[in-house]
Amino acid sequence: MVIAGGGHNGLVAAAYLAGAGRRVLVLERYGHVGGLAISTRAFPGVDVLLSRYSYLVSLLPSAIVRDLGLDLELRRRRYASYTPRGERGLLVDNEDDLRTAASFRDVTGGEADHEAWRRFYGMVGEVARALAPTLLEPLRPQAEIERLVGPEAWRDLFAQPIGRTVDERFGDDTVRGVVLTDALIGTFADPDADLLANRCFLYHVIGDGTGEWNVPVGGMGAVSGALEAAARRAGAEIRTGAEIIGIAPTGEVTYVAEDGEHTVNGGHVLVNLPPAVLDRVLGRPVTVPEGAQLKVNMVLTRLPRLKDASVDPRAAFSGTFHINEGRDQLGTAYAQAARGEIPELPPAEVYCHSLTDPSILGPELRGRAETMTLFGLHMPARLFRKNPEKARKMALDATFASINTVLAEPIEDCLLRVPDGSLCVEAKSPVDLERDAGLPGGHIFHTDLSWPYAEEGGWGVETEHERILMCGAGARRGGAVSGIGGHNAAMALLRR
């Protein structure tokens, strides 16, 4: 059988199928496997392995890691998040609930929002534990999932817009915003009206039954490297530099390599390509989705100073550091982007991987540099279509201005310079991802996320063609670095 695309999902499928004795060929157009789960030395002369695109792991099930014998270390982050507000900030410490409660009192002026936080995430935790195991099974019907999670969770997380739930449960604008960000990452949606935001929220809080976002030691490339090793160990053949130009319903795949055009027939084709790309190679009409993020990779000489002197920057930046992501700020930015404007105060969040995993820094830079990854919200592809270079610069300038409103010093003062004198800053808009990584619309989930249930059953990987299965992020229950699409496509074949 042929696996079209050597991203992490394709490697998961290859490892399972080859391990079951199937003959497997993986075709990948780039010179490397891993898709967007890779580590890169992005700045010439700077020995830092950046997770250039995807950067944290939550949805990858422990069951896949065990099944495939992956040599992979995922480290838990002690601090969930820090959110500056004025001269203070909200610190959520995973290991010190008393400290978290004190921070809530300091920021919100009372106990109510912390108690609401504990109740809400207690419910979310129960949903995660119930729902996560079903992601590796045939799809269950909606009514069964509703019974599984219970009426309160069904109403608040599935049935009514997540924005309404957040407003009902929390009173403080900052707290509301922190909760809502998980509903908006990589998704351009109005959380007050669009249940797409609910689906995005679910995928960000149910990972592996805990919802924790962990750090892959060695960067995201370590995840793909472990999966590639597992696939090869099981006997899969992997060909890089092989660009797929056609897929037939009969299972024939045509690709172009350095030595010319080839056609292979594997009986079944597992497609680890975005749905829009599959439509194109099948010769069908193509609908391009829309990504909605600005990804900025940086290397710093040191962590920036905070306005809140009571919090160690190493604590603030080792979790998710929220920037102008209050409830009202998110709403204003969405409205501006929907009008076709780059938000005046772009909401964003940053995280410093090297604080958790210093191994990504070369020996000469350890103790002398830190990485910083920024993910900007409400940056839909439409903003970058007309003039990509100009719009990217405008978005980056506005985002740096946004960061600087919550720091005690400009972020620019902390940036490392490469040997030629330029700053270690790399920004990627959705249009850049479309051009550089082959993602239609720059959509990081390949397509809008789907509910993790379906009345028609199956594994969520089936297409209208019996011999063609989706095995990537575009499969139902796909999205993020999870391997779930690859696992489920393999199981759909092995259990027939």
Image (cartoon, rainbow, N blue to C red):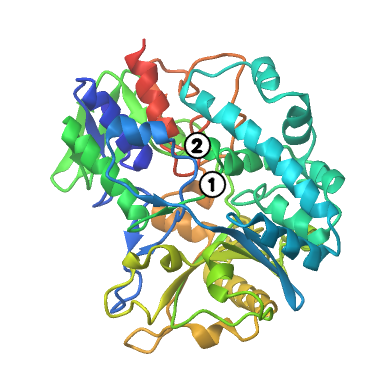
Q: Where residue 83 sits: x, y (%)?
A: 68, 66
Q: State the residue in front, 338 or 35.
A: 35
Residue at which label 2 appears:
208
Q: Mark 2 and 1 residues: CB-CB less than 8 Å, in contact?
A: yes
Q: Tell me the crowding category of disc 2: few under 14, some 14 to 19, or many 20 or more residues within 10 angstroms, Cα based.
A: many
Q: Residue at x 41, y 61 (%)?
A: 52
Q: Where residue 60 sits: x, y (%)?
A: 44, 39
Vertical comparison of 438 with 474: above or below: below
Which numbered tag is attached to residue 212? 1
Name which quarter of the figure residue 467 lies in.
top left
Q: At label 1, which amino acid type do we have?
A: Glu
Vertical comparison of 374 with 210: above or below: below
SS category of the residue bearing label 2: helix
Vertical comparison of 353 with 215: above or below: below
Determine whether, in the image, residue 303 is placed left or right of residue 232: right
The answer, for residue 398, to whether it is visible in the render is yes
The answer, for residue 33, to whether it is visible in the render is no
Vertical comparison of 361 with 51: above or below: below
